[in-house]
Image: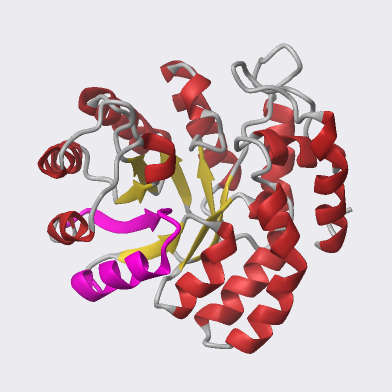
Amino acid sequence: MFHGSMVALVTPMHEDGALDYASMEQLIDFHMQAGTDAIVTVGTTGESATLSEKEHCQVVRFVAEKVNGRVPVIAGTGSNSTMEAITLTRCAMEAGADACLLVTPYYNKPTQHGLIAHHKKIAEAVAIPQILYNVPGRVACDMLPETVEQLSHVANIVAIKEASGSVDRVKQIIDCCGDRIDLYSGDDALALAVMEAGGKGVISVTANVAPRLMHEISSLALQGMFTKARVLNEKLTALHEQLFCEANPIPVKWALQEMGLIGPGIRLPLTVLSEGYQESVRDAMRQADAL
């Protein structure tokens, strides 16, 4: 249903933490010009954990209105509370999102049975297309391939963002689910390998900073032109690494500020990128032609 380079968009903020809608519109225009294939808003990179429910819905509506159907808009609506996830997912659908991205419940460590029940309940409650999101290193919960296989039979569960860091895991999911759902890389460094294994794209942090390159690499990969894609991907190797030198989205927000696209705002407990990492991020940006 969705494919290519899908940017996990940051949420611009003023220095006092207030949402910066002018910069948000500027970022959307930046991505439209660069060929980004879809915009994922209010996910982890969008600091969803520090937005209120009202802000969450406002941002989704703003992005959907400004994108105006030019590319799909996917809203992060996951929660460790099933009822809250339903509320956010319904709000995103009413705000004009094309799909929702639902991270596995964090902190409370549900069983695989609990994951199935959680996602089925959300899918039954809200008719919008839904994308599973497995990121065990961040949420302390791993959605196993057999669980994904069961959920792949739910009509409006259409894809999974897999961020376990394992291409073998990607292959297992594709083998057991077939074409019932699409698979996207949740790791920029593995995105090309995931597409070689049958993935349909990447939900990308790097695409915030180098959207045109990420689009071109994804487009080549999805056409089976992997040799050309690998040549371009070499320019992004350092950036893929340096954008995670501190917790996401600390480095990527700093990089976008360096590019003059957003201000310095970030909400506690996240803080501005440590000075000791700044030159390494700059060097990676230069290698990617982003500076």
Q: Residue shown at 43%/70% (left/top)?
A: 200
Of 139 and 2, which appears nearest the observer? 139
Q: Position of residue 265 (x, y in %)?
A: 73, 22
**Residue 251, horizontal then vertical, whole percent:** 71, 38
Marker count (numbered): 0
The quadrant in which residue 212 appears is: bottom right
Residue 260 seen: no
Viewer-closest of 70 and 12:
12
Left or right: residue 237 versus residue 51 is right
**Front in this rendered view, residue 101 or 103:** 103
Residue in the picture at 18% in, 41% down? 115
Q: Is residue 222 something one can see in this rendering? A: yes
Q: Is residue 265 above or below residue 74?
A: above
Place of residue 52 in the rendered image (x, y in percent of width and height, measured from the top left): 46, 16
Q: Does 269 sit above or below residue 127?
A: above
Residue beneath the point at 41% across and 63% down: 166
Compared across the picture, whether 186 is left or right of 23 comes to: left
Where residue 63 sits, quadrant-wise, is top right
In-image side of 61 versus 127 (left or right): right
Q: Does the magenta stretch include residue 130?
A: no
Q: In which quarter of the image is the N terminus?
A: bottom left
Q: Give the range drawn in magenta.
A: 155-179
Q: What residue is shown at x 73% (from left), y 29% (from top)?
A: 22
Picture coordinates of residue 15 (x, y %)? Answer: 76, 16
Q: Which colour scheme is used?
A: secondary structure
**Residue 251 left/right relative to 63:** right
Q: Residue furthest top?
A: 16
Pick the front one: 29 or 224: 224
Residue 175 located within the stretch drawn in magenta: yes
